[in-house]
């Protein structure tokens, strides 16, 4: 399961570290890369046995992520280079080892590492690679010797200290493990990596609260480009209570430091603990600790999910005022407007969505939100082109594909088109709960496979927040298995799911539990779970 944290993380980084341009991540090679490759290709076409040029092109191909072509050039380099070119051959074997590692060819990787070692057994790069290989293979004594030899030549090498700490942790030697990583922190108090290394070793030792504390120190004391926040999110998946306890101490000790409240609110929000998130978000805004449009938007989201539409509307407007160029707060406000008062305010909500479309007419979430507004008014034919436009903008959106399939199957009598979209959903990542794979399998008449999928989701991923169980309950409701759906809903609420709107009102296709609300046990479960829906 891929938790929806990428956007939250990016926004948190705005508050804690400098932002960097993503130009290097472009999918198409830039003009400089194309020019460099042309020089290499033209030269090698005229000089096919120039092993130096082949090796240089292999490195460029490696950085271009063209691994098969890189291996082909390295193979030719090793074939053509004479033995006297020992330095070149050493580098070539190590490059090929890295390429084998990327492609998962462990046996070939080991052979190349060993071959490099026979050429230059004292080179620290080779010593380090052999140490890493030995550690990954569980050969801790070999790894220990490799890194001890590095420290003999470089006594302040913190990577060597880190791996010695890892080895000690794997061997159950807690004091030795902490000694190595603490020494590194003493030597390099401003180096982010040593804090991350220390926290990783603490995780290996099962000291998850201590690891959380170290990540918070790294976040506060160093510019780690958001790595510590990322690690905290990952750690919270299986050790939520430890992470939240660490953040509680941080806010107690630093009541005017907004970033600690922001991180805690983002983690709580990630697991649908809206009441918990709201408390921290209010602390931030009420005390003017930080001001970002996303904080207002998250506050509005929490209030919307908890049923306070008027307050939610106020914060959505603050989000728009803070960033009037983003469609997202307009989408959120439209959902809130629809529910205000007696509800059904379609005209007002649609005007807000039209404002969002002016900002970006091809933004899939806006198009889908407007399509859903039309569907709620039974304007199915009007909704279809909007969903298709959303799919054109985001071809792998399970939400959009399922919505178009639902329209075609349930209302527009186009079974062939619906089947094609359901089958397209099955090509998406099966380990992502948001792939909606089980729902597509159900619509294709493959309920056994749908149940296998949702059971795997429940088994493989933590139940913090109960979101997986919510999907399971919705899937069973779609199948007509209300008794099983109620059981999953009970687990969902027992794990703290805090979306009152989702539980009581949400009937949007495709993930909803509307069929379960008429069951006798529903109101009992809801009444027994009121703490889930309170600010705390």
Image: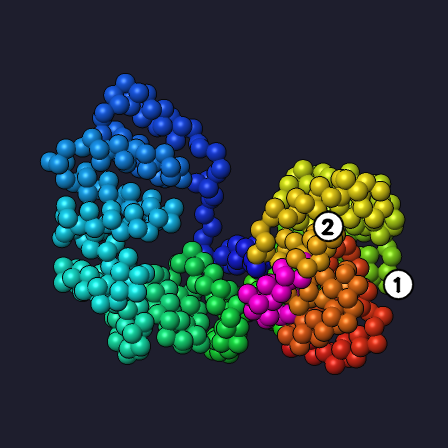
Q: Nearer the viewer, residue 173 or 79?
A: 79
Residue bounds of the magenta highlight:
450-467
* Residue that label 1 marks: 342
Secondary structure mostly taken by the magenta-highlighted segment of the chain: helix
**Direction bottom: furthest residue:** 528
Give whichever of discs 1 and 2 has the lower sequence position.
1
Instruction: Please tell me which residue lies in front, 449 or 486.
Output: 449
Image check: 389 left or right of 76? right
The residue drawn where x is 86% and y is 60% is 343
Dot 2 falls on a residue whose secondary structure is loop
Mark 1 residue crowding within 10 angstroms, few (<14) / some (14–19) / many (20+) = few
Q: Which mark is residue 110?
A: none
Magenta stretch containing residue 48, yes or no? no
- Can the viewer see residue 306 in this picture? no
Give above or below for 79 relative to 482: above
Looking at the image, which residue is at 86% across and 55% down? Answer: 345
Distance in Å between CA atoms under marks 1 and 2: 38 Å
* Quarter occupied by residue 216: bottom left
Q: The C terminus is located in which quarter?
A: bottom right
- Circle count: 2
| Nearer to us: label 1 or label 2 | 2
Residue 77 location, x and y as percent?
24, 33
Answer left or right for 249 relative to 293: left
Could you tell me residue 332's position as x and y percent? 72, 55
Q: Residue at 35% of width from left, 61% of height from top?
A: 192
Label ID, residue 444:
2
Residue 392: in sight, yes or no? yes
């Amino acid at each position: 399961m891929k938790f929806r944290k990428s956007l939250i993380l990016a926004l948190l980084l705005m508050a804690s570290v400098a932002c960097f341009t993503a130009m290097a991540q472009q999918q198409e090679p830039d003009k400089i890369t194309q020019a460099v490759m042309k020089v290499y290709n033209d030269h090698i076409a005229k000089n096919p046995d120039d092993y130096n040029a082949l090796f240089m092109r292999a490195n460029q191909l490696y950085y271009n992520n063209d691994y098969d072509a890189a291996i082909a050039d390295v193979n030719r380099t090793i074939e053509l280079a004479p033995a006297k070119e020992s330095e070149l051959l050493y580098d070539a074997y190590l490059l090929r080892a890295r390429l084998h590692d990327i492609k998962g060819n462990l046996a070939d990787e080991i052979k190349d590492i060993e071959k490099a070692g026979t050429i230059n057994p004292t080179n620290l790069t080779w010593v380090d690679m052999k140490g890493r290989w030995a550690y990954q293979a569980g050969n801790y004594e070999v790894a220990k010797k490799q890194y001890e030899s590095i420290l003999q030549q470089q006594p302040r090498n913190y990577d060597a200290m880190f791996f010695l700490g890892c080895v000690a942790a794997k061997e159950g030697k807690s004091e030795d493990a902490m000694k190595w990583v603490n020494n590194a922190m003493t030597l390099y108090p401003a180096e982010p990596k040593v804090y991350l290394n220390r926290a990783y070793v603490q995780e290996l030792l099962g000291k998850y609260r201590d690891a959380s504390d170290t990540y918070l120190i790294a976040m506060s004391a160093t510019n780690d480009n958001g790595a510590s926040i990322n690690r905290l999110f990952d750690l919270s998946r299986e050790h939520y209570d430890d992470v939240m306890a660490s953040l509680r101490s941080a806010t107690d000790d630093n009541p005017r430091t907004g970033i600690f409240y922001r991180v805690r609110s983002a983690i709580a929000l990630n697991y649908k603990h809206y009441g918990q998130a709201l408390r921290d978000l209010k602390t931030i805004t009420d005390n003017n600790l930080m001001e970002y449009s996303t904080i207002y938007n998250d506050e509005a989201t929490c209030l919307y999910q908890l049923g306070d539409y008027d307050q939610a509307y106020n914060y959505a407007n603050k989000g728009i005022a803070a960033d009037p160029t983003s469609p997202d707060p307009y989408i959120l406000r439209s959902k809130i407007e629809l529910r205000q008062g007696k509800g059904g305010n379609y005209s007002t909500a649609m005007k807000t969505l039209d404002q969002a479309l002016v900002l970006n007419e091809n933004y899939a979430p806006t198009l889908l939100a407007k399509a859903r507004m039309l569907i709620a008014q039974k304007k199915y034919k009007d909704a279809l082109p909007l969903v298709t436009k959303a799919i054109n903008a985001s071809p792998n959106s399970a939400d959009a594909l399922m919505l178009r399939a639902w329209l075609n199957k349930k209302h527009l009598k186009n079974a062939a088109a619906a089947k094609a979209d359901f089958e397209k959903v099955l090509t998406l990542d099966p380990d992502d709960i948001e792939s909606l794979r089980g729902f597509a399998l159900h619509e294709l008449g493959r309920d056994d496979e749908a149940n296998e999928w949702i059971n795997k989701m429940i088994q493989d991923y933590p139940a913090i927040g109960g979101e997986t169980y919510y999907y399971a309950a919705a899937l069973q409701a779609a199948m007509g298995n209300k008794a099983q759906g109620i059981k999953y809903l009970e687990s969902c609420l027992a794990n703290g799911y805090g979306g009152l709107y989702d539980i009581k009102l949400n009937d949007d296709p495709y993930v909803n539990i509307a069929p379960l609300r008429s069951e006798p046990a529903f109101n009992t479960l809801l009444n027994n779970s009121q703490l889930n829906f309170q600010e705390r």
